[in-house]
Each structure stands twice: as C-alpha cells, then as structure tokens.
Image (cartoon, rainbow, N blue to C red):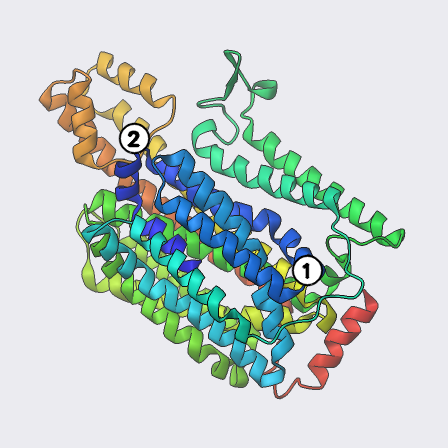
Amino acid sequence: MVLDSSVMNVSISQIVADLDTTVTGVQLAITAYTLVMAAFMLVGAKLGDIWGRDRAFGLGLAVYGLGSLTTALSPNLYVLLLGWSLVEGVGAVLVIPAIAALTAANYEGKQRALAYGVIGGVAGAAIAVGPVIGGWVTTEFSWRLVFVGEVVIVLVILFVRKRMQPSPRPEHPPKLDFVGAGLSAGGLGLIVFGILQSSSWGWLQPIDAPTIGGREITPLGFSLVPFLIVGGLLLLWLFGFWEERRERLGQDALLERALLRIQTLRAGLATLLSQQLVLMGTFFVLPVYLQVVLGLDAFETGKRLLPMSIAMLIAALAGTKLAARLAPRLVVQIGLSAMVVAALVLVGTIDVELHETSFKLSLAFFGVGAGLLMSQLGNVIMSSAPPEKTNEAGGLQGTAQNLGASLGTALIGSVLLAGLLTGFTNRLAENPAVSDPVRTQIEAATEQGIDIVTTEQAHAILVSGGLTGAEADAVTADYADAQLDGLKRAMLAVALLALLSLVFTRRLPGKPPKAEAGAGGATDRDDRLRS
C-alpha cells in the first residue's frame, strides 16, 4: 500500500500522458485514495470486531486485489479513481486495522516494540524501493505493471494466510453504527475535499467557482471552500454527540470516545497525522520539481529520491533501540527537528539546475527524521490502548495516518498551485515585454486556475494561442520563475508544519521503556480509569 502511493507520485507525468488528464487530476486520485482510507478506517476496524481480525484481513486483501486489477486496466482517470482511490481504499480499511490488532495480540513488551519497529521498517523499505521500482517499470514498460504485480502478491498472501493462527469470532459481536459511520465519513470527506478544491476554487476569494445550472456557487460572495470545511467540522461534532448518546443508552458505538482521553494515545495520533502530512506533502512536491522543472523521467526521479528512502529505512529499523536509551518523546522530537532543517535546506536547493550534493544530503537528513518517527508512533499508539480495544486503536491509527497523507497532498499541493498562480500573475503584470492585449488574454485564461506543465509545454500552448515568439518567450520565462517560487513556498510550508508538529509531542512517553515499565504502565492505566 505504501508502494502504491510512491508509484503514483513518481509516475505523475506518465499517468497524465497515458490517461490524457492533468497533474491536478492525478493529485485528486492520490488524495481520494488516502481520503477513502481515512474516512472509513473506523468502519473497517469495527467490521474487524464483528467478523474477526483474520477474516477482515482476508476479505480486505481480496477487495484490494480487485482494485489493483481495475487500476491496471484503467482507460481513463474515472476508472483509475474507481479502482485505485475507491476499491483499493475500501480494501485497505479492512486490512490496516487488522494488521495493527493482530500484531498487538501476538506480541508484548519489548517484542511488541520491535514488531512495530519492523512494521515501520517495512513501510520505510517500501518507500525506499517504491520510487526506483515504480520509476524503472514505468519508464521501461508501463506503470500499469506495478498494479498487476500487486494482484499477484495479494493472491500469494491469500494462499499462505491459512498459516496464520485464526482469531476466534466474537461470541456476541457488536453491531455496526451506520449513522456514526456516515457522519464521520461525511465530515472527514468535506474537510479534505474543501482543502483539495482550494487551489481551483480559492480559499476565500472565488477563483473558478463551481456552477449549478449555469449559476456560480459563491455563498455570501465567498469561495465554497471555507463552507465545506466548516460543514465537515460540524458533522464531526455531530458524530461525537451521536456516539456519546449511543454510549449513554448502552448501544454499540463506532468509536469508544474514552480512547481519545488517553493522553499518550492522543499525542501519538496527532503526531502521526502530522508526520504523514509532512511526508506526503514532500513526496508530492519533489517529484513535480524533478519531473516538471528538471524534465526527469519516473526512473530518474526515483533514483534522485533514493537517499531519502534509504535513510528512512535505516532510521526506522534503528529507532527502536535508540528509544530504549533516549525515550520515544525525545526520539520523535529529534526526528521532527531533522525534518524541519532538511525542508529549509531543500528550499534553498530548488533551482533550474539540480545541486546534487546539497540535494542528496538534505533528502538523507529528511529521511532520518521521518524514519525515527516511524519507529516510535505505532508502538506508542497501540501500547496505550487497553488490549480489548486494539481493533479500535488500529482504526484510529489508520485514520490519522491516511487523513494526514490526504491532507498533506491536498494542502501542500494547494500551496504550490496558489504560489504558482500568484507569482505568475505578478510577474506578468510587471513584464514590459508583454503587451497589454496579451496580458489581458492570459489573465482571463488563468482566472479558471493554472496547471503545472513544463516550460516547453507552456511555450507551445502560448504559440498555439497566437503569441509571437518573443512574447511567448517572455511569458514562459515568467511562468518558469513562478514555478520555482511556488515549489519553494510549498517546501517552506512543509518546514513550518514540521516545526508546529513539535507541539503534539509533549504528551508522548518521556522515559525509556525500561525506566517506565512500571510507572509508565500505571500512568496509562490511571489515564484510562480517569476517562
């Protein structure tokens, strides 16, 4: 599943050309994939309680394989959205909580910490090989073969799944809270959809407003985006109210809210969301820079990202031992600080020519920071929950992880597009080489938003639109400069978000596991009793 996302990111240019779509369209697919997982992860966790963990795991794999096959055969963006973003996402919401719960059920103490460290290392390994494998297969053959390979892997796992020790089906399985599922999914969906559309609809001032029956939808003269976000927050508030009511009446709830009152679990979830936001935002920006600005293909893009991926894998595997000496809180804080520094260095390295040494070092430093977070947060979250609530804790973990990923792609992508549009418009207004009629023509065209294309593509579009060679050159130069500024703004936003994420680490375990084996466990139990 991690490989999936990295393949999509490094194959953006090829997918755009193959499916005759745009970068924004692929951004929608990437965001929708993680959005589906974030929105329905709690439902998947509850279905694991109803069916049993191993049954949910097997069924989820089968659905995921079907989605991978659909994705491989996609003739256009709409089928890609169906197979990858929807069907694979639905399969993932069954698999991910089951993995977390099965791991918690089979390991304890140091072995559990090691197990979650291995899971983090596997994720790091997938990120490490994803850009290279995905880039090579995409360049030499087709990005579709990666998804064909996923179908084969799913079939193999389903064949050997019988070797797993089966988990007993609950004697009195809970009932699914359909109203709560709808409220939580609707709330999360509206929030992320609003952020995604901010690049085309505008945050406050309407840009390319949606229309119904020829009429633009601009409530009170503002963009629809803030209303979508506020509406999503309102649905999440109603979800909390509904769950409280069901608990009070003794009915099965989709989420036991007492879990969110456990301080270490809540801190782990918030930090995990922030980690994914920063990581996936970065993995959206850098491939755009390498492919659109520098003109690299998917395989070369993957090779350039390899220092980050390798460092992430090594740090994820080594982080569990480091936490035994320094404590999870300090390890996570070191990781976030490393990501801040690396993102700031990347801001300075983005240029029309690649600064190899500084680029590689900053990527490696960023990978170390991300890997350190990966090694800690899964164990912190799952170890903070009572044993009988591991399915729900796994669902919360998956929700935070994928919500952060979808927000990262949407938010950082919107910062990039907004910076590109603002920078291009400002440069165009001050360029004496561009005549007033041409300036008016281009400004009218960009009122509907702006796409990320190579300078060669931009120049060809301008010439086909009737501009002279000299004017097309001048406008293209403005567009190229605006691209670099937009990319730098996006990476600066990544650095700022990583810095702000340090706030969430205060409630993470502040002592090494050995030192807090008794005290820390008692603290967690006290937190649960108080809640």
Q: Secondary structure at mark 2?
A: helix
As drawn, the residue found furthest toward the bottom would be 514
Residue that numbered label 2 is attached to: 424
Give the residue pinned by disc 1: 51
Label 2 or label 1, whichever comes before in sequence order:
1
The correct choice, above or below, for 69 with respect to 446 in the image is below
Dot 1 crowding, Cα within 10 Å, few <14, some 14–19, many 20+: some
**Figure label count:** 2
Q: Quadrant of the C terminus?
A: bottom right
Residue in front for this viewpoint, 104 or 52: 52
The residue under the point 34% across, 50% down is 9
User: Residue 455's x, y, as percent?
Assistant: 19, 35
* Secondary element type, mark 1: helix
Quarter of the image where one finds residue 451: top left
Quarter of the picture holding the N terminus: bottom left
Residue 474 coordinates in the image, percent (x, y): 16, 27
> Real-space Cα distance between discs 2 and 1?
54 Å
Residue 75 falls in image quadrant: top left
Q: Position of residue 276 (x, y in %)?
A: 48, 57
- Could you say which is closer to the camera, residue 371 or residue 365? 371
Residue type indicated by callout 1: Trp
Residue 515 appears left or right of 175: left
- Foreground pick, 380 / 109: 109
Question: In front: mark 2 or mark 1?
Answer: 1
